[in-house]
Image (cartoon, rainbow, N blue to C red):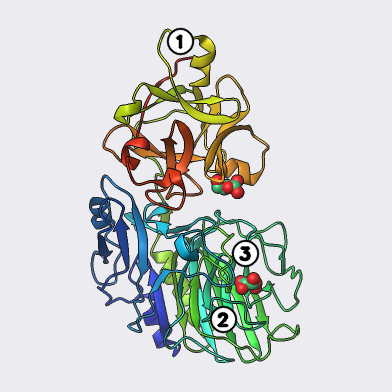
Amino acid sequence: AGPCDLYASGGTPCVAAHSTTRALYSSYTGALYQVKRGSDSATTNIAPLSAGGVANAATQDSFCSGTTCLITVIYDQSGRGNHLTQAPPGGFQGPEANGYDNLASATGAPVTLNGQKAYGVFVSPGTGYRNNNANGIATGDAAEGMYSVLDGTHYNGGCCFDYGNAETSSKDTGNGHMEAIYFGTSTAWGTGSGSGPWLMADLENGLFSGVSSGNNAGDPSITSRFFTAVVKGGPNLWALRGGNAASGSLSTYYSGIRPTASGYNPMSKEGAIILGIGGDNSVSAQGTWYEGVMTSGYPSDATENSVQANIVAAKYATTSLTSGTALTAGSKISLRATTSSSNTRYLAHTGTAVNTQVVTSSSATTLKQQASWTVRAGLGNSACFSFESVDTPGSYIRHSDFTLYVNANDNSKQFKEDATFCPQSGISGSGSSIRSWNYPTRYIRHYSNAGYIASNGGVHTWDSATLFNDDVSWAISSSFA
Ligand code: AHR
Ligand code: AHR
């Protein structure tokens, strides 16, 4: 059985079932998600390998070969047509044209399920999916349940990495107008024990870790790589439950009456569905999401426990984040541009500015050093890499506002993540393309001889699709200095 078969047996059927990694009903053979490629804007659907099975990642890999791909639709497997698509502007605007949110990279969150490769949804700040015309999702004070499988190590303090029930207007219409899973380290509303990240319920104008509006010590900091998050709510009753999605059972972090703060009892749920954003389209949060459902009715703990056992049996595991020219921490490299007009230029820096410069074996040592980088284990994720300046030890290539700089490591979480890159086989077919870890739609690119992290088409001049593949493909060799 799949998770939604278990919810149905428990009398609380799924009214939305979303996953890019697997079918959530044992008989489901339809599309899981749609990807769009950068080369020609063509789309294709990714289905399970077999009924009830893991996504056919090979279909995506061949469709997206030699270009970039975005996740455009996350289909609803419940039959109600509650698909998730690019979120529109609301109380806040997204970064894309006309205030829409960004779409996620199709390759930002690779994992395996029972040894088979699949891709999750890597939400960078600015990314969001939504359905404001959903069918059958709880409204008013009606009871519902939901769960999500998340990456417990990818989070931030921004508002709000959510999955669940939200406003149909994309605007903040008041307390109690949402009921969604939140995961992260926001301290603007509730907190739990330790320093987070925490599972909380986003009930609008408040992330709740328990019955009080502030701290509830029963809500633990999460440490597992894969995390099952559960929220459910009905008339004057709600619960927060969670557990390691790769082993063991769920714990109940809170179960009891609604918060006494005004507006949360009864609830005023509106029945839209969000992923990666707040109810008002707040877009500052990050996280990685693999699967989740919403139910009609308040699921029993026993039903949720059987869903957790099903998730554990799916055997989520990590897999490599890199490919292309192999890099070794401690070695020194230079990176040559491969675009034909620039193929004598190397990735270099002048002070804090990252640029490309023409360097040869007879260049001055100063210039050679400016174009040389020491490979380090990724400061923000040791499965990827960081690039330390050879002439300025302690300073690394990092992005800020999508522009590359060489800055001193200030040891902040933001710096470490901005300085982490995951190289892969060159998108042009040559060399390596060096993807930003925290913005996986973006790659290190030279544009007008300056350095950026660029997406293949987008709102910045340096996101231009013209020459994108060549500009993001670098020949990596031993360093000049
Ligand atoms: O409840 C927390 C957040 O507050 C909601 O997600 C958002 O709509 C509002 O800004
Ligand atoms: O470069 C994009 C973002 O801009 C970085 O993550 C952050 O440091 C800055 O706000």
Question: What label sits on residue 232 in the rendered view?
Answer: 2
Q: Secondary structure at mark 3?
A: loop
- Identity of the residue drawn at 48% across and 33% down: 450
Residue 454 in view: no
Does label 2 point to a residue whose CB lies under 8 Å from ligand 1? Answer: no
Camera-nearest label, 2 or 3? 3
The reply, left or right, for residue 204 in relation to residue 311 is: right
Among the two numbered marks 2 and 3 on one chain, the one whose residue lies closer to the N terminus: 3
In the rendered image, residue 50, in percent from the top left (x then y), is placed at 23, 67
In the rendered image, residue 441, in percent from the top left (x then y), is placed at 42, 50
Residue 213 in view: yes
- Which kind of residue does numbered mark 1 sit on? Ser
- Which kind of residue does numbered mark 2 sit on? Lys
Does label 3 point to a residue whose CB lies under 8 Å from ligand 1? Answer: yes
Vertical placement of residue 454 versus 169, above or below = above
- Identity of the residue drawn at 44% across and 30% down: 449
- Which kind of residue does numbered mark 3 sit on? Cys
Vertical placement of residue 369 versus 435, above or below = above
State the CA–CA distance, disc 2 to disc 3.
Answer: 21 Å
Identify the residue position indicated by label 1 in the image. 363
Q: Secondary structure at mark 1?
A: loop
Q: Determine contact: label 1, label 3, CB under 8 Å.
A: no
Camera-nearest label, 1 or 3? 1
The reply, left or right, for residue 474 in relation to residue 436 is: left
- Identity of the residue drawn at 36% across and 64% down: 72
Question: What label sits on residue 159 in the rendered view?
Answer: 3
Camera-nearest label, 2 or 1? 1
Among the two numbered marks 2 and 1 on one chain, the one whose residue lies closer to the N terminus: 2
The reply, left or right, for residue 175 in relation to residue 65 is: right
